[in-house]
Image (spheres, rainbow, N blue to C red):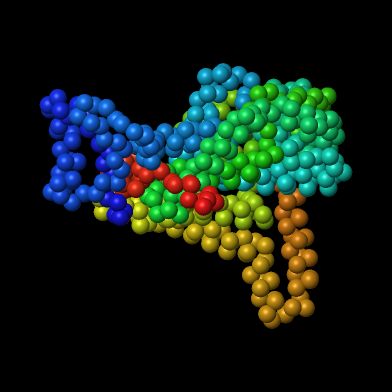
Amino acid sequence: MSPIPVVLAALFARSATGDEEVIENLTPLTNILNGTDESTIVALDFIATPDGRVRGWVEQSNLRGTWDIVWTCLVTTFICTYTLLNLNIPAPSDTPWILIKRRLFWMVFAVFAPEIVLTYAAGQWSRAKHSVKAFHGSGYTKWSLKLAFFADMGGFRLSCPGTDPFPLNAKQLHWLVVNGFVDYPKTSPAEIWDKSKQDRLAKLITSFQIGYLVVQCIGRLAQGLAITTLELNTLAIVVCSLMTAFTWLHKPSDVATPIDLHSPFDIADIIRDESKSCNQTHTWTNTPLDFIDQNGPGWSMNVQPFMTLPVIPEQRPIQRIPNDRFPMDPYGTQEYFLCFATLVFTGLHVAGWNMSFPTYTEQVLWRVASLILFGVTAAFWILETMASWVRLGRWKMLYLYFFDRAAIPRFRQATFDRLDQEEQEKPRDISTLPLPWEFWSIAPIAILYGIARVYQLVEGFMELREIDASAFVHVEWTQYLPHV
């Protein structure tokens, strides 16, 4: 408990009139003043005379109410998830109502699982950097991260005889350009950014609101004032969303229509050209260019069919690139950034280990839920790092460092050649994903993780029925200002 266990603010008004309701409300304060109650008065706003008037100067209250806490957290969460969310370009047939529902879904998803949204964003960032490297390697040095993000969100649409127009991702576009089926887009990064609807005022308001919450939490921590679990939840969401916004720094926002790229070649000729080069017949599931990249894997086009749920979108070829597409595993800087961000997000909940709760049971449940989130995340990154080291040959590199350093240059070159060869190989058929053993081994862990996360969000509101009194006291910012 806080050294200040109870907050009482009383108004002596019209007590002389014998108003029973007023007298009843003043009874707790009277008992304290008479010494018959062990509670402590933290704040006494002002006292009125028996005739209901207040004499003298009245200072502004240094307290905040429950609604102040709830309102600040809800507004911060809303504007954060709304303004920092960059979704892919919609299908031409999508109605305004569909767009609203889709954004609301991803806003709610960003509240319940902001680290998953961050993972999608980090994967898109990795794919964009990979695309820039591929285009530059083919001589198109003006290709930038903005163009790569724009392409992977469905910004370029192929129009050619033999098929309905469909969106291209960056890898498909690169193949078409290199093989002469479409011209390199003349669109500049400035033109792409002009299509983006980045609202600078909204970003400014969001930054201010986020900064206010972060500074408030730091100030409360410095002065020993209680932070509610609702504020801690909001802080974790905000921190994770900010890191998501950083990974999407070069991704255009709210682009409504793609740029059409016209090809004189029939789609059958394009597919036939590739079939001749690899001596096999191609069949496609999502677009005729599945032999280049299948726009996956993702929940809507892989997991839902596996669970015999409706596939979204239904039209083929697909008319938009799904927002839940996970284009590639983050690697290098993106992988380290994602690891740090997810551990910070889950670690913030562990930071509430010794917070006071209405009941001991709730405190135990919070601790268990926090350990589940942090433990699952940490275990994932340990296993992911071990697997990555195997793929990149770092375990053998470590062995050579201690026992055969002369062989390191030769081994390093062989590893680079192998990785380059893997990048040139045809993509894996994602229609076989997820594998049954993979799905049923991950599903129980994901369900447990989800239950723990939901409990933390619910507890944020349940705790408000009885919280530490110092949670209602404002931070005294004046003590940080120079004064005599």
Q: Is residue 274 above or below residue 356?
A: above
Where residue 373 sits in the image (x, y, percent)?
Answer: 43, 53
Displayed quadrant of residue 1: bottom left
Displayed quadrant of residue 208: top right
The residue closer to the viewer here, 104 or 331, is: 104
Displayed quadrant of residue 211: top right
Q: Residue furthest right?
A: 139
Q: Which residue is drawn at 14% across and 24% down?
A: 17
| Horizontal side, residue 88 vs residue 37: left or right | right
Where residue 22 sits in the image (x, y, percent)?
Answer: 17, 29
Q: In this view, does 374 lie above or below 466?
A: below
| Horizontal side, residue 335 vs residue 15: left or right | right
The residue closer to the viewer here, 185 or 215, is: 215
Q: Residue at x 78, y 28 (%)?
A: 191
Where residue 129 sits in the image (x, y, percent)?
Answer: 72, 46
Where residue 124 sits in the image (x, y, percent)?
Answer: 65, 42
Q: Residue at x 70, y 76 (%)?
A: 400
Q: Which residue is drawn at 44% across and 36% down?
A: 72
Q: Residue furthest bottom?
A: 403
Q: Can residue 193 be seen in this view?
A: yes
The residue closer to the viewer here, 292 or 409, is: 409
Q: Can residue 436 be seen in this view?
A: no
